[in-house]
Image (cartoon, rainbow, N blue to C red):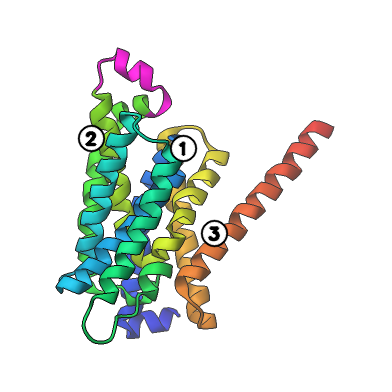
Amino acid sequence: MFEALLTYGFLRHAVLGAVLASVACGIIGVIIVEKKLVMMSGGIAHTAFGGIGLSYLLGFEPMIGALVFSAGASAVIATVKRKNQANPDILIGLFWSVGMALGILFIALMPGYPPDMTSYLFGDILTISTTDLWMMVILDGLIVVTVAALYMSIKAFLFDEEFARVLRLPARFLEYLIYLLIALTVVVLIRVAGIILIICLLSVPPAIARLISYDLKKMMGISVGVTVLLCLLGLWISYALNIASGASIVLLTGVCYGVVLIVQGVRRRITQKG
């Protein structure tokens, strides 16, 4: 594969895409796990499919449509959730289903043959284009700069929302910001894992990091490193075995988490016996 990297541009794009996606996923994934927003993130991710379908119907860049729809969904979900106007589970199910339904409807309304949506649903890291890479770079930059600038405020909000209010931190703003950052991360990850499989990468690497450290900054660093490793190994496996890259990365992630849990269980038993 190393020789192929020097020969094929699409493989270089895939490696760069894996690294860029890992940065966003590792940082925001920790926030998602700590704030228990995994399923809510899944709802935002599935809403993005409606934006992709509308983009194809109107003839503009699909990832821009995904960004608009996921950002809009994050704002609506945060607003409704804060005002307690609906059960969060109902809200998740609604956005999850309606987003997918809109995508299917928009694709059906297209004249001629419909495009292949498999790469958006299940991921295909080998199809990442130069435009996708630039978009990932911009979104990664926004995520990293925002989290770095507001790190202490986000940390206080994550671990104790009431304490954040006592400190007179803008709790409402931080909540909306976190949902928006989740939307940006979803768009970064679509090409790597796909809308349906995104939830695994958003939750498992941060969960592994949490088993190693409870320090938020260290957790983010470990999560980024674990995601990079899993994405690159998954890419290598998919290239070597000629199988779908998104499925390969996600299955490898699941296996890795299972191994970590087994090792932790064995260590716990040894410690108890000792």
**Quarter of the image where the C terminus is located:** top right
Q: CA distance from mark 2 to mark 3?
A: 30 Å
Residue 152: in magenta span: no
Q: Is residue 21 above or below residue 220?
A: below
Quick check: 132 left or right of 238? left
Mark 1–mark 2 contact, CB under 8 Å?
Answer: no
Q: CA distance from mark 1 to mark 3?
A: 19 Å
Query: Residue beneath label 1, please?
Result: 36
Q: In the rendering, at what x and y percent does residue 13 appear?
A: 31, 73
Query: Residue beneath label 2, please?
Result: 149
**Quadrant in which residue 65 is drawn:** bottom left
Residue at 30 percent of width and 17 percent of height:
165
Within 10 angstroms of label 2, few (less than 14), some, or many (20 or more) residues?
few
Q: Which residues are magenta?
A: 158-169
Q: CA distance from mark 1 to mark 2?
A: 23 Å
Q: For the residue marked with disc 3, what is the amino acid?
A: Thr
Q: Is residue 274 visible?
A: no
